[in-house]
Amino acid sequence: MELSGDDRREPKNERGGPDERRERYRQRAARLLGSRWWRGGIAVTAGALPALAFPAPSLWWFAYVALVPWMLLARSAPTPRRAALDGWLGGLGFMVAVHHWLLPSLHVFTVVIAALLGLLWAPWGWLVRRLLGGGAPGRGRAAAALVVLPSGWLMVELVRSWEGLGGPWGLLGSSQWQVPPALRLASVGGVWLVSAFVVVVNTGVALLALTGAARVATPRSATSPARSGAPTGRTSTALPARSGVPTGATSTALPARSGVPTGATSTALPARSGVPTGATSTALPTGAAVPTGPTSTAVPALAGILTVATAAAAAWAWAPRPEPAGHTRVAVVQPGIIADGIASADKRLAREEALTRTLVGHNPDLVVWGESSVGFDLADRPDVARRIAALSREVGADILVNVDARRSDRPGIFKSSVLVGPDGATGDRYDKMRLVPFGEYIPARSLLGWATSVGKAAGEDRRRGDHQVVMRTGRDIRHEEGHGRDHGLRIGPLVCFESAFPDMSRRLTRDGAQLLLAQSATSSFQNSWAPRQHASLAAVRAAETGRPMVHATLTGVSAVYGPEGSRVGSTIDTSASAAALYDVPLATGETAYVKWGDWPVHAALLVLLALVLTEGLRTLRRNSGRTTPGAPGTPEAGAGAPEPPTPGPAPEPPAPHARTAHGSPARPGR
């Protein structure tokens, strides 16, 4: 049986069909995001997601999409102020998640600090809405987002990397510590370049998500004039062929609720809308913005992701690699947990001595103890200095200890790396320069000293050193046969979270260090993510500088990394009390990062300055066009003022409804 024109129409979706369910989900999500408290909670949660890319979860791949929910939330903000609030709350979530292991020590003060540092992300949230909000962005805005948003993120990381704000712990690029291509990028532009590229990929994925959403929405708007946002014309449009209007039939006007201004000029709809050939159609009114297709957003998004992949491949192929320069044998002594008490310093020293004696006969070139491994000033306790010197003679290698004590020759408590040889202290000493806020000193103690009453904040401020030191050991570098010998290994010590600062390891490398050393102690956070996060930083510093790095701790995790950031040997875990010997490859040469420094940060700053200048000029032009007398389109009283527009002809009455072959009126949207 042949169906008539009316019966050939597509059946409507049944109640509960895919379109209806999708619409209900949209409405539910809109209600949820419209709630101030729900939206705030979602922002905090979205901001916390990137923490999963860091140790201990170490989901490094997740870093490349972890920012997408946060970005999509900020771009959907109804106002710029709300977007800035989403940025702040997301920053709060990120800082709490990355530093959650501080909660047992600083308690509620951890959240207070996170809230203050989270404010740094408020401008970034505003930028996300500015570049990604208001519908699917066109190619220009999408391309700008791929450059501006990573630059804004780098500025946040740069500011919070200041020692007084907690230092550069949790930089996004550090999450890629075990990814060789990312480590190669770090040798070119440091951790900053890796962070920027991770944000570029996140931005590209967010743009692709917006493209997908636009593709899903396009068929609905194309087939439903009442919802399409098409201007209501007094000029009429033809119905799609599937609505039962025969080819060449007279078209009907869209319903008045579409909101097209009277007298809108009309042009033909695109062919994909299903308008029959030769039919009359309406178009957007003159001056209306033309909707951007999904493809225009996808192209720069894919180009941005491809650029990151290409840059990583280029760095892998052409970036200067460290040149092998012999090797050295380094022993790491990790005493493990020692119960706190009056005699804890003596017990720790005794265990370190016992573990070091197990190295006798293994011929190490250097023995490294962890942070605060000696609780006595060696000048004040010559007996302790003699014991360590005797131990050095037994093992046949210098011992790098870390003294955490009040100095006898200067006022205050210092944390100092001291090199002890067979004849006693060699005279090489490095005093820690960058102290842990609240852990080793309290910023503005007169105002924030109350932190000591709510947690384990420093009761007395440690004193800081004023310069970095490169030391020379008494053992020569081991070369392959016939390649000669270098007299004394040059080592560059860092203490505790100084290994998080890329500029410090770069400085030591430029000063001639052949081996970087970090002496650390994370016993206060033994069962948290902190020990593994801290150890992972050594891999990034090694890759940046092209120098191997030893991370020696009191209670784990201790690890060693080669000149390209790859791990050497096995780690000493938090449950171990042991001494381990590592055959560490040495290298010469200068990486691009050592040579050029933090150039990605400088480039990001230039990008943001260009954005500010562009926006400022655009605002001035807009204001000038509104207020300048005699400007085109600006009415001015007196001579030369434009004549009022002549009223046009009255609009014609709407045409009668077209009729189908069966005589029933055509009903647009049916």
Image (spheres, grey):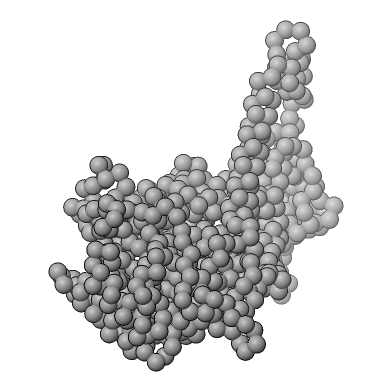
In the picture as drawn, the residue positioned furthest to the bottom comes out as 361
Left or right: where does residue 88 sit relative to residue 660? Answer: left
Quadrant in which the C terminus appears: bottom right
Residue 406 visible in the displayed image: yes
Left or right: where does residue 604 sit relative to residue 117? Answer: right
Q: Is residue 309 above or below residue 226?
A: below
Residue at (76%, 15%) from the top-left corner? 642
In the picture as drawn, the residue positioned furthest to the right comes out as 278
- Number of disc labels: 0
Quadrant in which the N terminus appears: bottom right
Tell me residue 454's x, y (percent).
20, 54
- Work out whether residue 420 or residue 215 is closer to the camera in this orientation and state it: 420
Residue 337 visible in the displayed image: no
Tell me residue 68's x, y (percent).
52, 61
- Work out whether residue 353 or residue 14 is closer to the camera in this orientation and state it: 353
Tell me residue 204's x, y (percent).
62, 61
Tell me residue 298's x, y (percent).
68, 61
- Tell me where residue 383 sits by quadrant: bottom left
Residue at (84%, 55%) from the top-left corner? 277
In the picture as drawn, the residue positioned furthest to the top comes out as 638
- Tell me where residue 587 sits by quadrant: bottom right
Q: Is residue 213 above or below residue 584?
A: above
Residue at (50%, 85%) from the top-left corner? 583
In the picture as drawn, the residue positioned furthest to the left comes out as 342
Residue at (76%, 51%) from the top-left corner? 269
Q: Is residue 302 above or below residue 608?
A: below
